[in-house]
Amino acid sequence: MFDAVKEKERIVEFIRNYYRENNLKGAVLGISGGKDSGVVAGLMCEAIGAENVVGLTLPCHSKAADANDAQLVAEKFGFELLNIDLTEVYDSFKDQIKLLGDYTEEQTKNSDINIKPRMRMMSVYYMAALMSALKGGTYIVPGTSNACELYVGYFTKGGDSVYDIAPIYSLTVDEVIKVGEVLGVPEKVLYRTPDDGISGQSDEDKLGVSYKAIAAVMNGEEVDEETRQKVEKLHRGSRHKFNIPVYRKDE
């Protein structure tokens, strides 16, 4: 039986220990307005103090509701929330790509989707380095991926896969929600239908399978064979995101 109170306390202690052992000061993370970043923000604030946490909203042709929900999280936990609008940067990049060839929207669709989290990763690390210089101590970047997303590779290589500490790495979506309830993450954020804020689709629509089904397969529970095959296909097809082949010359 998952004990959300105990798990929250264990994660907070895990974060505190890591900060003590490595003489770290603060954290900078992207706040999307979704449950994962909301829960991670709450955990970081409890572990190291809200005064040492900086949240970033990083809109890029995004919905205004995302920023509003991010503000709810910042107000709840009391951390500073900054906005860096990446829309013009993205548009400028796309203008340069158009000079290379006459590509269709369908041909660039996947590239367009994945460049946004990579731009956000760049921005979060820039601000972490800046805050380190301004505050006189090292700021690092927490990751916001949960276990279900990681199992099926639902993240962008070189984007939201890049971080320095992973507080919810082993929690399923339902477990993230339970920890969020303990933390008091605003309900509008915690129970929002998960989406990437990029493609216009929900996460589950894009994956073609529910997070509950993914968790069931991960936990060895019974699911119908078609669903199991879908989940395992996603799992196998994403292994390249975790393992980089390295050629080693004979010594």
Image: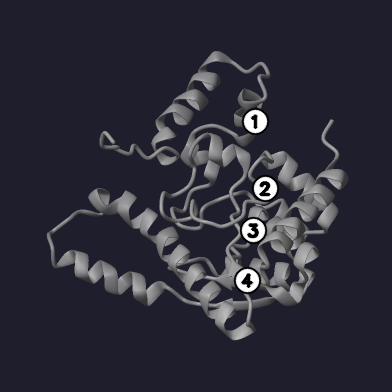
State which quadrant residue 37 falls in. bottom right
Q: Which mark is residue 215?
A: 1
Specify the quadrant that holds the C terminus. Answer: top left
Q: Which mark is residue 55?
A: 4
**Contact? badges 4 and 3 (CB < 8 Å):** yes
How many residues crowd mark 1 within 10 Å: few (<14), some (14–19), many (20+)? many
Q: CA distance from mark 2 to mark 3?
A: 10 Å
**Which residue is at 53% across, 44% downward?**
203
Tell me the SS state at disc 3: helix
Q: CA distance from mark 2 to mark 1?
A: 14 Å
- Whichever of callouts 1 and 4 sits on the residue coming sooner in the sequence is 4
**Which residue is at 35% across, 69% downward?**
90
Location of residue 232 with respect to 161 vertically, above or below: above
Q: Which mark is residue 6?
A: none
How many residues crowd mark 4 within 10 Å: few (<14), some (14–19), many (20+)? many
Q: At label 4, which amino acid type do we have? A: Gly
Tell me the SS state at disc 1: helix
Residue nearest the viewer, comparing 132 with 1: 132
Q: At label 2, which amino acid type do we have? A: Ile
Q: Position of residue 39 (x, y in %)?
A: 71, 56
Q: Is residue 177 left or right of residue 246?
A: right
How many residues crowd mark 3 within 10 Å: few (<14), some (14–19), many (20+)? many
Residue behind mark 3: 37
Give the image's coloring scheme: one colour
